[in-house]
Image (cartoon, rainbow, N blue to C red):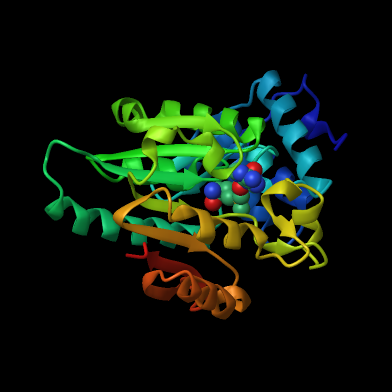
Amino acid sequence: MDREVFSQDAPVSWKELLAETARLLKGDNSELEAKWMIEEVSGLEYPEDYQEQAKPIQLKRLKGMIERRVTGEPLQYVLGRWQFRELDLFVDDRVLIPRPETEILVDYALDECKSKKDDLDATRSINVADLGCGSGAIGLSIVRETQNVSVWCTDISEGAISVTRANLAGLGMAGQRVSISQGSWFEALPVEMLEKFDIVISNPPYIGDSEELPIEVSDWEPLSSLRSGPLGTEDLSFLLNNSIDWLSADGQLILELAPMQADAMVKEAESLNYREIQVRHDLAGRERVLIARKPL
Ligand SMILES: C[S@@+](CC[C@H](N)C(=O)[O-])C[C@H]1O[C@@H](n2cnc3c(N)ncnc32)[C@H](O)[C@@H]1O
């Protein structure tokens, strides 16, 4: 790190910095990660512009990012942003890094919104609750990709609520259809919304206390986003049991889960008399989403 390239006095081009950053990062993805860091710090999109020289303040920022990354901090936190569907989300260590498998939940919610749109009169918008919103990935994507949907984003974590609020700014006018509140699951919602949600959607914590996690996850991401309790299914069960009161007559519950939890959660949904219970797969073909319609 104390190589001349990073000395703040010597002029250095982005091209040289790209090579040096990749060298310092090491690892399989080092070239790609170096490119993303350079893009983030330089604001340059095209490699042909990499002949330009970096300013001292940019050098300092890049050096700081490399130092963080080589200690094992996830790239997403180091960059301070991550792509989720159409959104470029601000992320830091107060929130779970949005995962690609979660993107599919939004597709199922959008399908349901489309089919609801034809049934509802034009004067009322579709209501969605995104419980445990984290960065806002699910709820803000639904708002971004629809015209007539209002979303309540809630989370127990004050830090997560701040991050969702920061990401709301990126939605422009569509952001007017978003409400954000802090609290444990349904406690964050106003009682006027009882039986009014067309969709309750959540990617809750679903990892058991004794399940091992990769170090890059356990050392950096908030454990309160990941761990649910000894079984791992505690939050899923809570949401299954309590969504009934908040769903509209034909409302739908959409939950992300781990593949090994699917059978047990289907049984629990059946015992609660949910209708049209389905388990859907993620892009890797694993059982990942439980969808169920409110009991009659
Ligand atoms: C797996 S993360 C999902 C974050 C985001 N929805 C996503 O998909 O990237 C679970 C989220 O649930 C929140 N959470 C945990 N316990 C909660 C509770 N009792 N009430 C509300 N939110 C909770 C965590 O703070 C975390 O943001």
Q: Position of residue 161 (x, y in %)?
A: 57, 32
Q: Which quadrant of the figure contains the N terminus? A: top right
Q: Which quadrant of the figure contains the C terminus? A: bottom left
Q: Position of residue 290 (x, y in %)?
A: 46, 68
Q: Is residue 142 left or right of residue 131?
A: left
Quarter holding residue 184: top right
Q: Is residue 177 above or below residue 206?
A: above
Asked whether 276 or 289 is in front, the reply is 276
Q: Is residue 138 above or below residue 233?
A: above
Check the image and name the residue furthest to the right. Answer: 2
Q: Is residue 213 among the parts visible in the rendering?
A: yes
Please report the residue visible at 77 percent of the width from the left and 32 percent of the height from the top: 64
Q: Is residue 154 above or below residue 258?
A: above
Asked whether 280 or 181 is in front, the reply is 181
Asked whether 214 or 162 is in front, the reply is 162
Q: Is residue 83 left or right of residue 106?
A: right
Please report the residue visible at 61 percent of the width from the left and 26 percent of the height from the top: 53
Asked whether 146 or 295 is in front, the reply is 295
Please report the residue visible at 70 percent of the width from the left and 63 percent of the height from the top: 207
Q: Position of residue 256 (x, y in %)?
A: 52, 62
Q: Is residue 274 left or right of residue 32?
A: left
Check the image and name the residue furthest to the front. Answer: 296
User: How many labels were placed on the picture?
Assistant: 0
Q: Is residue 76 among the parts visible in the rendering?
A: no
Please report the residue visible at 78 percent of the width from the left and 64 percent of the height from the top: 230
Quarter holding residue 159: top right
Quarter holding residue 11: top right
Q: Position of residue 17 (x, y in %)?
A: 68, 38
